[in-house]
């Protein structure tokens, strides 16, 4: 009897290894292949359909062969940090980043497009409630300390990820990066908006403003770094702050 758990564990490992890589790992002995085929199809299709739902643009950009080769490689090679289905998208993103680090011949846009598509799911699942963020929604954004929404994420990509489509895949990234704001508003709608470099930099500073600088101080610092006169830069920045508040990207002031 003491041997039974060890045998069972060995069978489970063999079963899992075969499901991950049926071409290299034999199934546990004594199981009819017809029955194993049911499990192979069930397990793979579950992961494939989940990834196709999480990354619909990638699915349309890769042909069937390339898509299934990628999913099977992920299924075979990746060791997940969590068993939770909602986290499979993050695990796939980790896998694509690891592939890029080791020089796999994937399309250059693949990891960045995966991140862009994952952000929408991540914001949808985030449990933060904007109503719980302490702030004065009507505060003076220049005199006070602007409070950025924790659900407003400034994003920068080398590829125009928001424009990639089957009929629009550039052969190389453009010379200028793409700046986006990913946002979940007070109505829990997730939206993306393209940002100017100035507004992107402003959102980054708002999130990093641990010292509690006022909106005016942040804008004056940005003007100095850009070599622009503050009396022109600050009004433009104030207008950007007001627009960000209208979109729920800035919630108010401390």
Image (cartoon, rainbow, N blue to C red):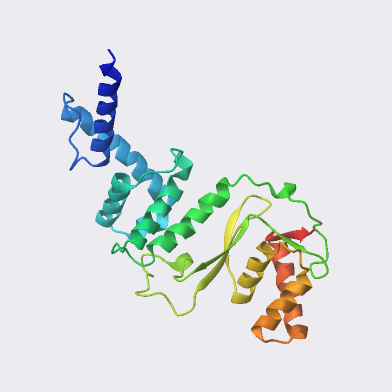
The x, y position of residue 105, in whole percent, is: 28, 64
Q: Is residue 42 left or right of residue 149?
A: left
Q: What is the count of numbered marks?
A: 0
Q: Which residue reaches farthest front?
A: 2
Q: Is 63 above or below relative to 142?
A: above
The image quadrant that residue 194 belongs to is: bottom right
The x, y position of residue 23, in whole percent, is: 18, 43
Q: In which quarter of the image is the N terminus?
A: top left
Q: Is 186 above or below relative to 14?
A: below
Residue at the image position 38 percent from the left and 49 percent from the top: 52
The x, y position of residue 121, in whole percent, is: 51, 50
Q: Between residue 60 and residue 11, name the one nearer to us.
A: 11
Residue at the image position 68 percent from the left and 46 percent from the top: 129
Q: Between residue 30 and residue 119, name the one nearer to us.
A: 30
Q: Is residue 27 left or right of residue 93?
A: left
Q: Is residue 152 left or right of residue 34?
A: right
Q: Is 38 above or below relative to 153?
A: above
The image quadrant that residue 13 belongs to is: top left
Residue at the image position 16 percent from the left and 26 percent from the top: 29
The image quadrant that residue 159 belongs to is: bottom left
Residue at the image position 46 percent from the left and 71 percent from the top: 158
Q: Quadrant of the C terminus?
A: bottom right
């Amino acid at each position: 009897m003491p041997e039974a758990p060890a045998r069972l564990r060995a069978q489970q490992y063999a079963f899992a290894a075969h499901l991950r890589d049926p071409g290299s790992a034999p199934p546990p002995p004594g199981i009819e292949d017809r029955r194993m085929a049911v499990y192979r199809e069930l397990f793979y299709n579950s992961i494939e359909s989940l990834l196709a739902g999480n990354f619909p643009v990638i699915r349309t950009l890769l042909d069937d062969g390339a898509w299934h080769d990628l999913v099977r490689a992920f299924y075979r090679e990746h060791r997940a940090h969590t068993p939770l289905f909602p986290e499979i998208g993050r695990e796939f993103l980790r896998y694509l980043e690891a592939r890029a680090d080791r020089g796999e011949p994937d399309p250059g846009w693949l990891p960045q497009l995966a991140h862009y598509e994952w952000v929408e799911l991540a914001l949808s699942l985030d449990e933060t409630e904007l109503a719980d963020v302490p702030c004065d929604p009507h505060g003076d954004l220049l005199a006070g300390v602007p409070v950025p929404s924790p659900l407003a994420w400034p994003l920068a990509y080398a590829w125009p990820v928001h424009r990639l489509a089957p009929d629009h895949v550039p052969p190389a990234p453009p010379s200028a990066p793409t700046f986006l704001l990913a946002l979940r508003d007070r109505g829990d709608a997730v939206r993306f908006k393209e940002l100017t470099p100035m507004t992107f930099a402003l959102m980054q500073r708002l999130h990093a403003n641990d010292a509690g600088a006022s909106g005016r101080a942040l804008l004056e610092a940005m003007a100095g770094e850009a070599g622009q006169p503050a009396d022109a830069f600050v009004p433009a920045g104030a207008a950007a702050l007001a627009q960000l508040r209208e979109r729920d990207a800035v919630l108010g002031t401390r």
